[in-house]
Image (spheres, rainbow, N blue to C red):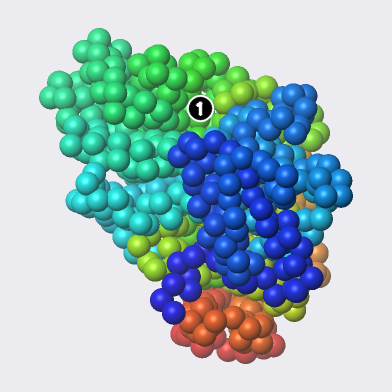
Amino acid sequence: KAEDGYRLWLRYDRVTNSRLLESYARQTRSIALTGNTPTMALAEKELLTALSGLTGRKPEITRQQGATTTLLIETASAKLSKAELSTLGDEGFIIKTTGTGAGQVLVITANTDRGVLYGVFHFLRLLQTQESIASLNIRSVPRMKLRMLNHWDNLDRTVERGYAGFSIWNWHTLPGYIDQRYTDYARANASLGINGTVLTNVNANATVLTPPYLQKVKALADTYRPYGIKVYLTARFSAPVESGQLPTADPLDPRVQLWWKNKISEIYALVPDFGGFLVKANSEGQPGPQDYHRNHAEGANMLADAIAPFKGIVIWRAFVYSAEVSDDRHKQAYNEFVPLDGKFRPNVLVQVKNGAIDFMPREPFHPLFGAMPQTPLLMEFQVTQEYLGQGTHLVYLAPLFKECLDSDTYSKGKGSTVAKVVDGSLQGHALNGMAGVANIGTDINWTGHPFGQANWYALGRLAWDHQLSAAAIAEEWVRMSYTNDPGFVQEITRMMLASRETMVQYMNPIGLHHIMATGHHYGPAPWIADLSRPEWNPVYYHRADSAGIGFDRTSSGSNALGQYHPGAAATWADPDTCPEEYLLWFHHLPWQHRMKSGRSLWNELCHQYNQGVEGVARMQETWEKAGKKTDEQRYRQVKMLLNIQHQEAKWWRDACLLYFQTFSRQPIPAVYGQPEHS
Ligand code: GCU
């Protein structure tokens, strides 16, 4: 079947447990769905599709509650008290069993249709994961306001760091042709509560701001609106020059300010609920305010002032590093942004990558979290696996996301987690959120690797509720995407949860980082040393020499550690207390350094790399046994990909150990066999 992967986690296959099937059929026998807005129509359509699939019976849906109604779906339902509704905000919902006996009705309600739609998806998830719905009292409110995908999609449909085909947006046939994929994409996002999408690459092209393209943007915005999804665009800072023929893009020049004002009015005339702009400026060669000797705040505020009358926002990225700064790249964003805290307009958020280098398999949290109390910081995770094996490696990312979110910044004392910084609760920011760089493309299964879907899913679920555990999210996803078979669920969830650590072991153990090949970032190349900019070279990061290995970021080295609150930095500062997963991130240590295992650092490195390879072999075994319980197509796809991953894990191990061995000058312990590549 061609569509095995296409349906994502919204498969709605028949419920296999007959007791539950009967209860679900009973509870959904007679549905009243009041209101006839486009969003309510979507809720109705989803229920019809889902329940027909799950129960095998097309439900009866009426417009008004009657004596026989078993499931009532309505906005601001009178079945609930005003007090109950008042805590839900614009997007939260309640699913509650009300009444008793024959009068028992299950109610799904919210203050808005959007909230109701989220409630319907949540309800369907209960059925998909075979939960009891006999007596429900669920209240769910998103912990973050902006729950976004960032697409690094170019107008020619190539996707920067995309490994799942081309961009799903066909700018050529827009605005006249609305591809089914656009709505299926919106459904999938709405099912998770994702409420914003940035359509274009951060390395922006000003063409999207021209009138013909804005018509296309409008068509997409109109399509996504009923799903509660706002459209955002990236703004190329030099657009007034490229597109407006002005001699300058200086944010303090009145002509530039006027150009953006007019452009923004033009956008809002077409898209009245346009979300705003995402801006990458003065980073990796992109234009920005510093080209005119203005700072990031002056650049961001100019756009913020122009968009404020329309209630739009500006999301300004903190991912900056440049050739002009010779200090440890780790430190640049903090150095540029911390002095600007308090200088941004209220409708500006600063978007910060989870770590200070660049979406590594493992990074400590970015030192900006907690360090800019007056500025809302939006989390940027990368869902597409640029540095994590790209489209061929099975790596479940929720543990990575959680590790960062749960990290303690200590900025307002113990317990000041990154999650509390980005959900706004630590500093009281009403504007807050989380974004993921999307892994979506035109591949039939959307994400290339069938398990890439789990990372899209996890990003959305955590943006809604960062307190969910990685295990709970994996389990839901497996149940919805594959089967509720208990053995399969247990085995595959376990495999997913271990996958990230396995990948760290075969790629970047003990705090190593950025030793991927240059440019494409696929595969190992720790030996690269001759690129024009030092911070592009892997040798810059591992610093291996005959004495040892690792990047000294303590006070005797670059002192990037000094950017963290002492509460967080204290344990990292001393190699004896530093968790070993960050050891070579912060320290340069001798090859003989004694590790907790009792092994020398060199032997531990060999051990870790080998563990990584063995971890992939275990994944293969798990899939071989459990995978047969799924459809032939996905079974074979994942099997082939795991074979590639196993080969590549060995490639990583052998390449890195043989290279580092030229410095350590010690044997690879015989227990690991001889490298297969030489
Ligand atoms: C990484 C990535 C680039 C991207 C950049 C960014 O460096 O390799 O392709 O443009 O991040 O986040 O801006």
What is the x, y in percent for residue 328? 50, 41
Name the image quarter holding residue 553.
top right
* 485 w.r.t. 284: above or below: below
Task: Say which residue appears at 40% left-offset and 48% top-offset.
Answer: 151
Say left or right for 519 vs 8. Answer: left
For the question of whether residue 265 can be seen, the reply is yes
What is the x, y in percent for residue 148? 50, 41
Using the image as rendered, state which of residue 450 and residue 172 is in the foreground.
172
Using the image as rendered, state which of residue 254 and residue 604 is in the foreground.
254
Task: Say which residue appears at 48% left-offset and 23% top-offset.
Answer: 348
* Residue at mark 1: 349
Q: Residue furthest top?
A: 254
* 6 w.r.t. 119: above or below: below
Task: Say which residue appears at 44% left-offset and 53% top-offset.
Answer: 185
What is the x, y in percent for residue 398? 63, 56
Say left or right for 217 vs 47. Answer: left
Looking at the rendered structure, the kind of residue marked 1 is Leu
Using the image as rendered, state which of residue 299 and residue 125 is in the foreground.
125
The kind of secondary structure element at disc 1 is strand
Task: Say which residue appears at 79% left-offset and 35% top-offset.
Answer: 415
Q: Residue furthest right?
A: 101
Q: Residues within 10 Å of mark 1 (few under 14, many from 20)?
A: many
* 490 w.r.t. 532: above or below: below
What is the x, y in percent for residue 332? 48, 35
